[in-house]
Image: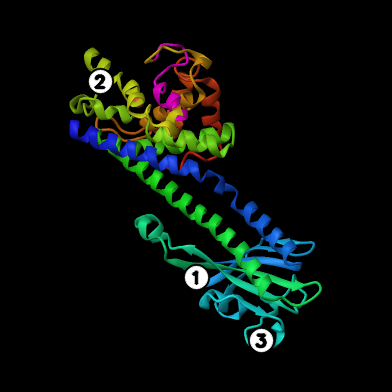
Amino acid sequence: MKEDIATYTTKIKKLHSIMDMIENVIQVNELDDIITEILKAGREVMRADSSSLWLIDKDKKELYLKVFLGKDNQIKKRISVKLGGIVGMVAETGEPVIINDPKSHPCYDPEINGNGGKESFCVACVPLKAVCEKEFFDQPGKSNQQKIIGVMMAHDRHDRPFNNDDLENLNAFARLTAVNIQKRIMYDKLRSMFFDTIMTLSEAIDSKHNFTRGHSRKVAEISSLIQELIHPDKRMKELILVAALLHDVGKLYSDDNIVKKPGKLNKDEYEHIKKHPVDSFKILESITHLKQMLPGILYHHERWDGKGYPRGLKGQEIPAMARIISVADAFDAMTSERPHRSKMSIDNAIDELKEHSGTQFDPDIIEVLILANESGLLNGGK
Ligand SMILES: [Fe+2]
């Protein structure tokens, strides 16, 4: 068990550094706004009627319109083109082009190269190049390979056709855009690694009880559903999701024989198990990015009437996140199969929770769970 704990602690420490990296690129959440601003600036500098950004969809082998900025309009709907055409040609060859008589070009397509429905009399088009994702993550020392991720385009100049200076300008805007998109790719990758690691830990916690496979995931799903119904805030939903996935991580310190014991625990065994919220807190407290989730984890066994543990907090003294996890935890325990008893139906479990509303559980949260059940939202994980 000591080896297990060391392994898990190391994993958690790794998480810390991953989250640090995420913090450094967090601003990429506003990617669409950033791209729009860059396109606007590009359009102004080049004195173009419009500008557009196309990204490659590798799976579909096509390019899709990410943002189009016309004189008076902005198109954000998904328009896709197969490789071919002027846009596709630049994506394939990686070579910037100026075409001052696009209608006579063999790759001209009025749908794609037109200016918001009007026909263009000139276009400038450059590739968007980013460091290869694999190189970026697996071989940071050798990150000089680039791949083409899309194309930036300017359509129609007011006074004269585009020239090489325009192409250089457009290239600069394309590089700026590629850097921001690359940040986004990195952020998504890190985020996925973070959740994969959290899920692995969560499964390790549940494997301590050979009869509660998937328990933490289900508690997380129910907790985030309740959170969303109370206050649909994306950040809060994510916080409670992670807190619920890790709420029993302290059980990795607990005695296997007690954790896996079917049926009632004696007094000493119960006292031993009661240590797990504090142990969870100790395991996770050094991880800066998990600090906001700690109250949900430390206090998930507190009771509304003050008779819970570890501190005997009462009512609103108990952090909201912990009150939600407490209800979700009890609901999933009751509606899951256990060796010593059959699982309850959802309606019976709700009735049981109602009986303890105002004593063990926050009555408002029980009301939200009832509402979720009446709306048919509780059947997904069962
Ligand atoms: Fe617990």
Picture quadrant of ligand 1 = top left
- Give neighbour class at mark 1: few <14, some 14-19, many 20+ (Cα, 10 Å): few
Q: Amino acid at mark 1?
A: Lys
Q: Which residue is mark 3?
A: 105
Seen in the picture, residue 278 relative to 193 is either above or below; the reply is above
The answer to whether residue 82 is visible is: yes
The residue at the point 31 percent across, 33 percent down is 342
Note whether ligand 1 is within 8 Å of mark 1.
Answer: no
Cα–Cα gap, marks 2 and 3: 81 Å
Residue positioned 52% across, 37% down in the render: 237
**Residue 14 location (% of width, % of height):** 34, 40
* Residue at the outermost right position: 159
Q: Are marks 2 and 3 in contact (CB under 8 Å)?
A: no
Against 329, is 184 above or below? below
Which residue carries the number 1 mark?
60
Q: Is residue 202 visible?
A: no
Q: Looking at the picture, tell me which residue is in the foreground, 129 or 249.
A: 129
**Residue 264 circle label:** 2
Which is closer to the viewer, label 2 or label 3? 3
**Looking at the picture, does residue 313 appear above or below residue 69?**
above
